[in-house]
Amino acid sequence: PLAMLLGAEKLDGSELSSVDSKLVTSMAQNLGIFLANSMLYEDLQGMFMGTLRSLVNAIDAKDTYTYGHSERVAYLGRQLAKKAGLDPATVERLYLAGLLHDVGLFLIAIALPEEFIEISNRYAGSDESLDECEKAMIGFDHAELSAIILSKWNLPEPIQKAVRYQWIPVRQVGEEAPLSKVVHVADTLVNAQGITVLGEPGGEQSPEEILATLGLSEQAEAIMEGFHKEFEPIKTFF
């Protein structure tokens, strides 16, 4: 990018001095550094997001049936956040929270394969929720583990809390509450489409009923159509 500073006569009518020239030069140099850092930040952010998507898709692909679940939750969550009128920064945080909401589950599968199988079998053969099965077998659930991992990665605390409380958004208070609620609703909607993890039940709720939590039930048809329209062109990259 090219930038230009234009100067005119001083307000008091005096001519520009060498001191004025040096001040303007210094200001131009600082602006140049700022622009360069801004461009570098955008490049690093792009690399970071690409790395995260690759990581999630790699572990997500261990099960061809659930392949793309996390990406779907992230994309749908971002759309819901926009519809709910959340600010742009929160919308992007919501995307990250949706993308990483199940990272703890995949790491359990990788680090504790035997326990993971036991959890899967117990969950399939009981009326317990997945987090209840996890706590009974290993003492913690994957939402807790996901939040710990995001903390180690130094991701913003609102994202950590959104992931930690994705099953129990009613416990959330403060400005992070919308994130956990949106992650919960997006995950429920994706499960309802049959793209689930460990065969989590999609439930019998309609999109209208699910979206009522965010006050968006009347926009359910448009939201789902918009999501599919946005998602179809990019899903082949998963």
Image (spheres, rainbow, N blue to C red):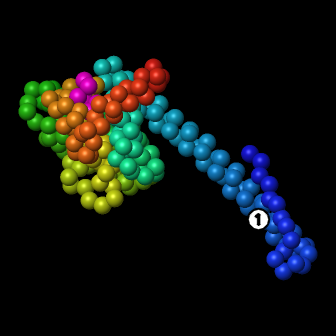
> Which of the pair 137/207 is nearer the observer?
207
Task: Indicate the quadrant where residue 76 lies.
Answer: top left
Please state the horizontal and vertical placement of residue 230, each as a whole percent of the image: 43, 28
Q: Nearer the viewer, residue 119 or 56?
A: 56
Across and down, in percent, residue 86 comes to: 39, 50
In the image as oriented, which residue stretches furthest toward the bottom? 12
Instruction: Give the quarter of the image for residue 33.
Output: bottom right
Please state which of residues 33 and 55 is positioned toward the viewer in this rendering: 33
Asked whether residue 114 appears in the rendered view, the answer is no
Tell me if residue 118 comes above or below residue 8 in the rendering.
above
Identity of the residue drawn at 46% across and 24% down: 234
Tally of marks: 1
Q: Residues within 10 Å of mark 1 (few under 14, many from 20)?
A: few
Q: In the rendered image, is residue 161 in sight?
A: yes
The location of residue 168, given as percent across then percent down, is 21, 48
Q: Secondary structure at mark 1?
A: helix
Residue at 82%, 60% in the rendered image: 6
Q: Nearer the viewer, residue 212 or 72?
A: 212
Q: Quadrant of the C terminus?
A: top left
Report the magenta stretch's main SS: helix
Q: Which residues make up the magenta segment?
A: 189-194
Where the N terminus falls, by quadrant?
top right
**Which amino acid is tagged 1?**
Met
Residue shown at 69% from the left, 53% from the top:
35
Which residue shows up at 30% across the image and 37% down it? 219
* Image-based side of 146 in relation to 133, left or right: right
Residue 24 included in the magenta stretch of the image: no
Q: Is residue 160 above or below residue 118?
A: below
Residue 46 x, y percent position in the rendering: 56, 39
* In this rendering, position of residue 46 left or right of residue 76: right
The residue that label 1 is drawn on is 27
